[in-house]
Amino acid sequence: MDTEILLNHIVKQLRMPTIGKQYRSIAWEAEERNLSYKQFLLVLLEAE
């Protein structure tokens, strides 16, 4: 299954609309800033 489709499905099930809307831009920013996975996850969850 396509990753995008799966991620969208999971965030809907978990009722996390902000993550659903922002994870792409936050992932891009994390990559640009060379954030670790844990740092990326923290930023993502703080957005929610």
Image (cartoon, rainbow, N blue to C red):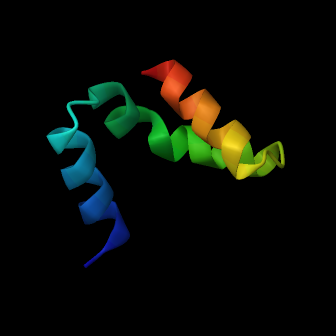
**Split into 4 quadrants, where in the image is the N terminus?**
bottom left
Instruction: Identify whether 14 is placed above or below 7.
Output: above
Marker count (numbered): 0
The location of residue 23, given as percent across then percent down, is 47, 41
- Left or right of 8? Residue 21 is right
Q: Residue at x 69, y 50 (%)?
A: 37
**Split into 4 quadrants, where in the image is the C terminus?**
top left
Q: Residue at x 32, y 55 (%)?
A: 7
The location of residue 2, given as percent across then percent down, is 30, 75
Residue 25, quarter of picture: top right
The location of residue 22, given as percent across then percent down, is 44, 34
**Can residue 11 be spotted in the picture?**
yes
Q: Residue furthest right?
A: 34
- Left or right of 11? Residue 47 is right
Q: Residue at x 25, y 63 (%)?
A: 5
Instruction: Identify whether 27 is placed above or below 43.
Output: below
Q: Residue at x 69, y 43 (%)?
A: 38
- Left or right of 12? Residue 35 is right
**Can residue 29 be spotted in the picture?**
no
- Left or right of 23? Residue 13 is left
The location of residue 33, given as percent across then percent down, is 83, 42
